[in-house]
Amino acid sequence: MKPEVKKQILSNAPYLLFVYLFGKLGQTYRLAAGADLSEKLLHLADGFSLAFASAAPSFHLFDLAVGVAGALLLRLMVYCKSKNAKKYRKGVEYGSARWGGPKDIAPYIDPVFDNNILLTQTERLTMNNRPKDPKTARNKNVLVIGGSGSGKTRFFVKPNLMQCVSKDYPASFIVTDPKGGLIGEVGQLLVRCGYRVKVLNTINFSKSMRYNPFRYIHSEKDILKLVNTLICNTKGEGEKSTEDFWVSATRSLTVKSQRTNNKI
């Protein structure tokens, strides 16, 4: 038997009892003495006694019609009420949000510890972009917000840099470090794991590997991009900083100078 058919039978089976009860009421009315409705109502008690003298159902056409009609009417009322019923969520009037537990995060964790992004001491996120269950695939972007000294570097950046030992999901790292301490703390680890470490230190140039933007210039479009970058990042403050005349003049002069010096 199909599950849908079985479900319909089980949900409508109780109405057979109401067919029986309404049929008995029809039998009560039919057996009551009297020629019209008012007389039958006066002798309804006698009809009730006669109808329930035997527990067997009545198969008289009138009794069956009353039983089926009564059960159908009741079923219709229940159906209409269920369609218009309001969905109450008792106990969660103020929301159903809750703290997650180990069972909630488990599907998102890779069995191999090194193949995860470390979120907390117990919560991790697999670096696999195509897990076995597609529903557990998640974006790997992580936003960490915290004030100075709250542990953003110590408890998130450094532990995840140490995940460089992963063999299944090798990754490149680009780290901005205003304090300048990360290279001394994890630099040797990255080197031992086979990483090629490059450092750009804009504060202490003696500790920097330097960066020469002219090596990446191959056309006049590249010159214009570099000039626009320099102008946007060296624009001062004040009323004259927004005047187009000075910006245009600076751009033209810088483009001409770079074209001449680099012989493009």
Image (cartoon, rainbow, N blue to C red):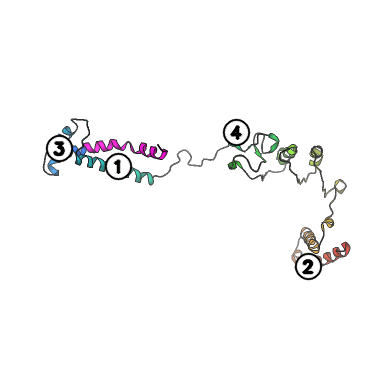
Quadrant assignment, res 78: top left
The residue indicated by pointer 4 is: 102
Amino acid, disc 4: Pro
> Magenta includes 19?
yes
Q: Which mark is residue 248?
A: 2
Q: Which residues are magenta?
A: 1-24
Q: Alpha carbon of mark 2 to alpha carbon of mark 4: how far?
A: 60 Å
Quarter of the image where the N terminus is located:
top left
Q: Point out residue 261 in the picture as x, y percentages from the top left corner.
A: 88, 63
Q: Which mark is residue 74?
A: 1
Amino acid, disc 3: Leu
Q: Return the residue nearer the eye: 51 or 60.
A: 60
Residue 203 in the figure: left or right of residue 6: right
The secondary structure type at the circle numbered 2 is helix
The secondary structure type at the circle numbered 3 is helix
Determine crowd level at label 4: few under 14, some 14-19, many 20+ residues with C-alpha closer than 10 A.
few
- Overall secondary structure of the magenta section: helix
Marks 3 and 4, the one that precedes in the sequence: 3
Amino acid, disc 1: Leu
